[in-house]
Amino acid sequence: MKEKNNYRIRGRVVSERDGQDVGNVSVGGWNMKIILSIPILLVLFILYGYGNLSEDSHKNKGKWIATYSKSSNNGSVEFGDNKKSKNNLKWLMNHKSKKFPGGNLIKGEDASIIVNSKKSLISALDAAKSGDIIYIRDNAIIDLSNINNIIIPQGVTLASGRCTGQKKGALLYSTILDKDAWQLFRIEGDNVRITGIRFRGPSVKAGSPPWAMCIKTFNHFENIEIDHNEFFGWPRAAIEFDGYKLDKDNLSSVHIHNNYIHHNLGSGFGYGVVISSAYALIEKNVFDQNRHSIAASGDPESGYEARSNVVLDKNSASSHSFDMHRFGRQDTSGPAGEFIKIHKNTFLYSDKPAFIIRGKPTDQAIVENNTFAHKKIASSDFPYYYRAVRQKNKFGNLNVRDNRFGKNHQHELGFGDFDGDNSKDIFWADGQNWWVSSRGQLAWKHFSSSNITLKDLAFGDFDGDGKTDVFRTHKGRKEWLVSYGGTSKWTKIGTSNIGPGDLAFGDFDGDGKTDVFRTNTSKKEWLVSYGGTSRWTKISTSGIGLGDLAFGDFNGDGKTDVFRTHTGRKEWLVSYGGTSKWTKISTSGIGLGHLAFGDFNGDGKTDVFRTNTNKKEWLISHGGTSKWIKLGTSSIGLKKLSFGDFDGDGKTDVFRRKGTEWYVSWAGKSKWEQINAGFDGDL
């Protein structure tokens, strides 16, 4: 018979095998109701009563944890206070839960309770009190099929590690597609947060019976936050709020942000987020393949603000993205909500309108400062925005202004190490917001709200902290500006009206900070602004312009060198640090336009890469000095390739895009591997 593994949760011992209570400890003096015998408490006293606690206890000071280890098959309780046993026991019985500030990502060490199984999760929620943080281990995969209506009580945070580094976070799933299944979780109280978890429903197919939803609440609760999660496969809805009765001035009391919500495609429903008699602030989410990404019932006391979201370019249900019903389906004169504001979003799916409002709101609907892939319509019979925004049944109180139409930047990608893990991430400026995919393997994460797109940006590490910063020029004010890490506000670092297209970037003095390089061909000068903050410093005399130069570290000294080709003499030449005279490093007649650069063998020196599409070969010259060596077999030419170290092994990989799919050949030697396949979770 399998040994029972007990979980102690807030003074309560729960069996992992059968989930039954085997004891309760009340809080308050020595007034205890105990089914579990007194000797067990004495054992705890003996175990923890002498000397110091374990090293692990020091690491978890101030909390205790209910865990289950598959490797040891033992349940454990950790007391994190380095005191004698009576103090530990007193702390256990009278502990106070800590409140974690909303919005910050939660880690395991922040938690009150850690769980990793179905029964420990249910038991923890059942015993939880306001202020508790229940953390589900990042590698947990928990089947919650045949369960519904799991209560998340007032003041409780349910968390895992999605969006923390490379972690995907715990996966909670249900396979039940039944008309009686309804919601998997129900929020029952104020101050609830759900963060960093993956939730998989029973079906990702369009037209599925609309009988399963993930999270719902029915009552007027405030300060609800749902963030950094992934929701997919919920045919009715991923998230539904019903009956909040808040007004538009308090809509941020329900805050849904930084989630990846996709493949919720039930027949007639299929909502990412749905609002009924409620208000919500919905921002910085990625929506994809939902019948309606956002919908609302049209109740006269309902609405939403949707800002800084992106709707990607596919919808198998062939329906519009954002929706507001009219109240009273049979009454065409019924109102369509009270207040709706849709701004700073990007809509890439353009086969259907981005937003349909099915009546006249009692206050107003504002659609402003969005970017639409939809083109304007040239017709006197319809407003210019008709392809993107439509009003039906009863008209008025709709304001559409200051939007961009016919714009789609989804294939304009930049590269940098935005999280400082020594691996390339993928950067996307969609026209309203900046997004980053860590290593190209995780779903888009919102970085900043900005309508500046890739053509006006450059990248470098201007403060030397190991993270890529974003650079731009404000020509009108003659300013160079940097957003540190791509997340900070713009900071002026220099005075100049020269834009990124006339500049190059590298570390010319080897101090770990990016410098700004330019040429002045009329004066035959190469100039550098160190860190982008110093005045221009002449580093060399040369009449060769920027378009005929490339950059790399060809001798491995940590300083950027300047590379050029002399096709007439069939020479490759390098100026070390941009300050030395030209040095011939190789004999070749292949010009700069047919070359790329990277460190393909990880020796710290820049190699030269080219393609030979006739022979389906990729070739490399190590350090630019060796003969051509075959690196890989491929017919894909240079113009379709990009380069970076996407796995952090110190070697340059080859990247290509095929539609919305991204592929990498590791170090240019492996077969193509799709790296963003995980964007759709575990479909």
Image: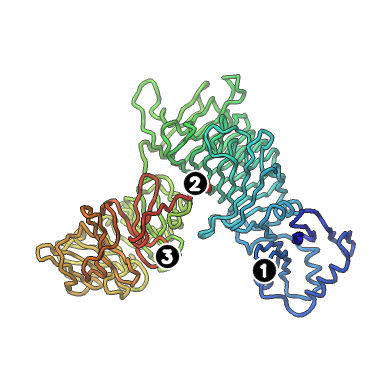
Q: Nearer the viewer, mark 2 or mark 1?
A: 2
Q: Is residue 7 left or right of residue 471?
A: right
Say whether marks 3 and 1 touch (CB < 8 Å).
Answer: no
From the viewer's side, name the closer residue of 561 and 267: 267
Which image quarter: residue 387? top left
Q: Is residue 680 left or right of residue 39?
A: left
Which image quarter: residue 508? bottom left
The residue positioned farthest toward the left in the image shown: 568
Mark earlier in primary sequence (2, 1)? 1
Residue at 38% of width from left, 52% of height from top?
Answer: 663
**Disc 3 and disc 1: Cα gap in Å?**
30 Å
Q: Is residue 515 visible?
A: no
Q: Secondary structure at mark 1?
A: loop
Mark earlier in primary sequence (3, 1)? 1
Mark earlier in primary sequence (2, 3)? 3
| Residue topped by disc 1 | 60
**Disc 2 and disc 1: Cα gap in Å?**
35 Å
Q: Secondary structure at mark 2?
A: helix
Q: Nearer the viewer, mark 3 or mark 1?
A: 3
Q: Secondary structure at mark 3?
A: loop
Q: Which mark is residue 680?
A: 2
Q: Is residue 608 left or right of residue 369?
A: left
Q: Is residue 609 visible?
A: yes
From the viewer's side, name the closer residue of 376 and 435: 435
632 vs 386: above or below: below
49 vs 382: above or below: below
From the viewer's side, name the closer residue of 375 and 528: 375
| Quadrant where the image shows the N terminus | bottom right
What residue type is disc 3 on? Answer: Gly
Q: Which mark is residue 648?
A: 3
